[in-house]
Image (cartoon, rainbow, N blue to C red):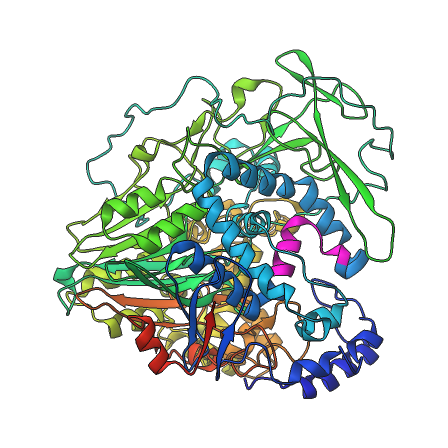
């Protein structure tokens, strides 16, 4: 896609506003046209030369003690920060991040905080209400307060970053605001460590808020325990876990499970109220100034995932470790990630940051490389609360009438009076829902926790600042000790030979008899979490004999690991990656890239022969034989032009739906894992699950359903072949606000959800990185976008085409400020 110049995009927006063709998830309202087209401060000014000019040498005289150092830009617009100390680097990182991504930082943290309705009006009222009720404001506030008291070193860096952001905002005039502010008619929020905490809580929500407790209750109740256990076993027998059993653990080994509830986790946010709550006689439920918003489920997206792996020196052509990492997240413009180099005395790091937070999340320096994938453990439990009154001011806890703590928030609604929202909090957490499957359930969520120094030596901010500066394995381990949520598989490689992966986070230890899989009685404190798995007991895989470590969101550990957990895991990409790495004796940076870009689907490889074997070939029409030939000759690669990939996806989804037609997900039932369905197709084709109850006089089998689905697709196609896979998958990189003209065209390259090159309609590899360690590390990377968040900038999507077509850019680190001055296309000098 070529970037859209704003003078042209203004015409696109005008047509959009006139004809009202947009209906996106955020529900953007029609803006105030007067402000948008205003001759002095309207969108026209966004097409003029920018304050963010990267082709000139600019001196910045900012009245701030941390404004010292330089930012140099390369030919892709990537900033390279050179500073005398960490706080000054954070200040400049905040400044340049705001220059490029201010609206993205603003709107993404508003979404977590429940403040979209200030900008977007009633269309986001239900979402904002749920964000507030589910405690995300409280979570960010608690994290900020804890950091201020317990972790002043981390707070100092976050305050320096915020000062840099605000220094950028303070010198903006309304006509210089990013164009999205003009479209929506609002102003930038000032930045603070609280907003950085909101950003991190938003990532936690995206990656660790999947749960299905109520669905498990319903499914088990309707199917019966035996059928439920058969369809939903606790683990995949043929899994290839991130940390295999290696003799460290023995089945049934004792653990450090505490017998009492951890007081470190029962902070003031969970403690019972000490006084009778005020009688809030507002609204029917007693907790809202207006009618309570209905139940709205906002789970983490199932396509969120990632790959990473590292090979040791013996399996590398350079005789030094090589590391690869590619996180799979929502694809958007501007990109989720922001490329940056940060150089301070003793540290020269490069990688990607999150706009709104200091440091480098994934990257490398002179000594190490690191990256993350999502763990996928269930860290949200729902406790059934027994209220003693209709107003929900008291509940029963161990037979005692216990007052709830009422948290009052204000929701500001554009064009209307503020709304007061009051949420009862119990010892387990907030009670966000009064209707739906989680009505009157307290939400115990890891993302609410903000433990102090008795649990961790630093915060999440300290983790990534520590990784950015790490020199060896011990530094890497220390950095991870402060990390809580969202749990990640932190992969590591060091130039002198060490490789490792540590699934890390605040893994809950649940009460005896409680698994977190179903809703839990909330009438006794004995059902509360016992604490976190001790850091020393969290799984680790270091320098294994097989010569590599890897993760792709699969099961974390082998069956002997003594701490139980549940979650959602992908059992296909990880097995395929491990199979490839096990067979290759020598890896290069090129073969690492090829594996990242592989569109081979192990799901298709295992399932397609089972489906084909159940087709009655003698009964096929000519069109049917052509479809069977198409799928039979397929190599299981989901390339963009493949029609077989499209037919496979149509076929397997239809057979799956027919198999479980009596337990649809939209009716609240769990859906069996694909591996379990494959196992039934292969080993138990006459299982009762294949029988359709709506046809009592006929007993269907796996073969019956497979043939029926095949015939239905043939009829739908009406003699035509399926469309190419890229068209069927329909991948676009949309603008963060779904504004027309600011997103990409159709992505026509290969990739699928269960391939290493994971790609669906709106999710995929948000960053790909390969790092060769050694005396002078070399690295390559690519992302679906560019440095700038300005749709009128040449750096808005200048890397998108290369990303889509599998091309990488070398991630060059300039060694010092002098080299940067010589090679940069432009520079900002702070003084």
Write the residue at 20% across / 61% down: 321
- 101 horizontally vs 351: left or right: right
Based on the picture, tell me whether residue 191 belongs to the magenta stretch: no
Compared with residue 608, is residue 480 higher up or lower down, i.e. above or below? above
- Residue 507 is drawn in which quadrant? top left
Query: How far from the left and from the top, in percent, is residue 437?
Result: 68, 38
For this rendering, which residue is in front, 477 or 397?
477
User: Is 407 on the left or on the right of 788, as rendered?
Assistant: right
Where is residue 731? Give x, y as percent: 54, 73
Q: Which residues are magenta?
A: 105-118
Look at the picture and state if 186 lies above or below 438. Answer: below
- 224 and 283: which is toward the camera: 283
- Note whether 550 is above or below 280 in the view shown: below
What is the chief secondary structure element of the magenta stretch?
helix
Residue 575: percent from left, percent from top: 31, 56
Location of residue 505 by image quarter: top left
């Amino acid at each position: 896609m070529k970037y859209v110049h704003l003078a042209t995009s203004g015409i696109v927006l005008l047509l959009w506003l006139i004809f009202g063709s947009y209906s996106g998830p955020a529900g953007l309202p029609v803006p105030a046209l007067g402000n948008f087209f205003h001759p002095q401060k309207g969108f026209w000014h966004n097409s003029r030369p920018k304050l963010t000019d990267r082709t000139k040498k600019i001196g910045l005289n900012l009245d701030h003690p941390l404004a010292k150092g330089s930012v140099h830009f390369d030919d892709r617009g990537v900033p390279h920060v050179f500073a005398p100390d960490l706080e000054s680097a954070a200040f400049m990182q905040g400044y340049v991040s705001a220059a490029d991504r201010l609206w993205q930082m603003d709107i993404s943290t508003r979404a977590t905080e429940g403040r979209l309705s200030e900008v977007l009006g009633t269309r986001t009222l239900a979402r904002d209400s749920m964000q507030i009720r589910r405690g995300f404001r409280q979570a960010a506030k608690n994290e900020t307060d804890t950091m201020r008291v317990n972790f002043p070193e981390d707070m100092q860096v976050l305050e320096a970053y915020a000062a840099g952001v605000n220094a950028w905002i303070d010198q903006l005039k309304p006509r210089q605001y990013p164009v999205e502010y003009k479209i929506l008619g609002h102003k930038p929020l000032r930045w603070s460590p609280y907003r950085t905490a909101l950003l991190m809580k938003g990532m936690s929500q995206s990656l660790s808020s999947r749960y299905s407790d109520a669905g498990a209750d319903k499914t088990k109740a309707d199917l019966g325990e035996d059928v439920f256990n058969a369809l939903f076993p606790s683990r995949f027998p043929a899994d290839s876990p991130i940390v295999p059993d290696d003799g460290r653990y023995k089945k049934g080994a004792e653990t450090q499970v505490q017998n009492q509830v951890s007081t470190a986790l029962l902070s003031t946010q969970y403690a019972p109220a000490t006084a009778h709550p005020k009688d809030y006689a507002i609204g029917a439920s007693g907790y809202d100034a207006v009618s309570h918003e209905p139940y709205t489920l906002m789970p983490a997206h199932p396509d969120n995932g990632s790959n990473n792996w590292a090979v040791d020196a013996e399996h590398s052509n350079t005789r030094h470790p090589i590391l690869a990492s590619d996180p799979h997240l929502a694809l958007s413009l501007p990109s989720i990630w922001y490329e940056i180099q940060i150089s301070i005395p003793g540290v020269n790091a490069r990688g990607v940051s999150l706009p709104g937070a200091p440091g480098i999340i994934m990257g490398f320096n002179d000594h190490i490389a690191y990256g993350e994938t999502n763990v996928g453990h269930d860290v949200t439990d729902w406790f059934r609360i027994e209220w003693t009154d209709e107003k929900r001011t008291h509940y029963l806890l161990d037979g005692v009438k216990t007052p709830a703590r009422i948290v009052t928030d204000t929701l500001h609604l554009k064009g209307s009076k503020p709304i007061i929202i009051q949420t009862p909090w119990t010892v387990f957490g907030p009670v966000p829902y009064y209707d739906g499957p989680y009505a009157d359930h307290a939400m115990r969520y890891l993302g609410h926790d903000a433990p102090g120094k008795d649990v961790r030596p630093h915060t999440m901010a300290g983790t990534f600042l520590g990784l950015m500066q790490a020199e060896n394995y011990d530094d890497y381990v220390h950095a991870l000790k402060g990390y809580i949520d969202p749990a990640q598989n932190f992969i590591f490689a060091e130039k002198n030979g060490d490789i490792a992966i540590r699934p890390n986070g605040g893994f809950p230890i649940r009460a005896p008899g409680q698994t977190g899989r179903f809703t839990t009685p909330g009438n006794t404190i004995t059902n509360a979490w016992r604490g976190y798995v001790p850091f020393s007991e969290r799984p680790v895989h270091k320098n294994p004999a097989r010569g590599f470590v890897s993760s792709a969101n699969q099961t974390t550990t082998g069956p002997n690991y003594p701490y139980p957990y549940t979650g959602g895991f992908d059992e296909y990409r990880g097995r395929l990656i491990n199979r490839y790495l096990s067979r290759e004796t020598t890896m290069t940076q090129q073969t690492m890239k090829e594996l990242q870009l592989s569109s081979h689907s192990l799901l298709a490889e295992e399932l397609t022969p089972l489906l084909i074997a159940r087709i009655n070939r003698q009964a096929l029409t000519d069109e049917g034989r052509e479809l069977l030939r198409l799928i039979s000759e397929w190599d299981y690669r989901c390339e963009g032009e493949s029609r077989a990939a499209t037919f496979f996806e149509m076929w397997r989804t239809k057979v799956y739906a027919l198999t479980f037609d009596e337990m649809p997900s939209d009716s609240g039932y769990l859906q069996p894992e694909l591996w379990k369905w494959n196992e039934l197709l292969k080993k138990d084709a006459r299982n009762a699950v294949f029988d359709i109850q709506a046809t009592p006089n006929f007993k269907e089998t796996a073969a019956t359903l497979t043939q029926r689905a095949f015939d239905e697709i043939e009829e739908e196609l009406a003699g035509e072949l399926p469309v190419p896979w890229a068209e069927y998958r329909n991948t676009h990189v949309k603008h963060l606000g779904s504004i027309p003209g600011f997103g990409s065209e159709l992505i026509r390259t290969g990739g699928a959800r269960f391939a290493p090159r994971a790609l669906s309609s709106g999710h995929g590899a948000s960053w790909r990185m390969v790092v060769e360690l050694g005396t002078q590390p070399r690295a390559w990377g690519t992302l679906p976008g560019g440095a700038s968040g300005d749709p009128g900038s040449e750096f808005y999507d200048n890397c998108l085409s290369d990303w889509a077509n599998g091309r990488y850019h070398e991630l060059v680190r300039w060694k010092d400020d002098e080299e940067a001055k010589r090679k940069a296309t432009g520079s900002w000098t702070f003084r």
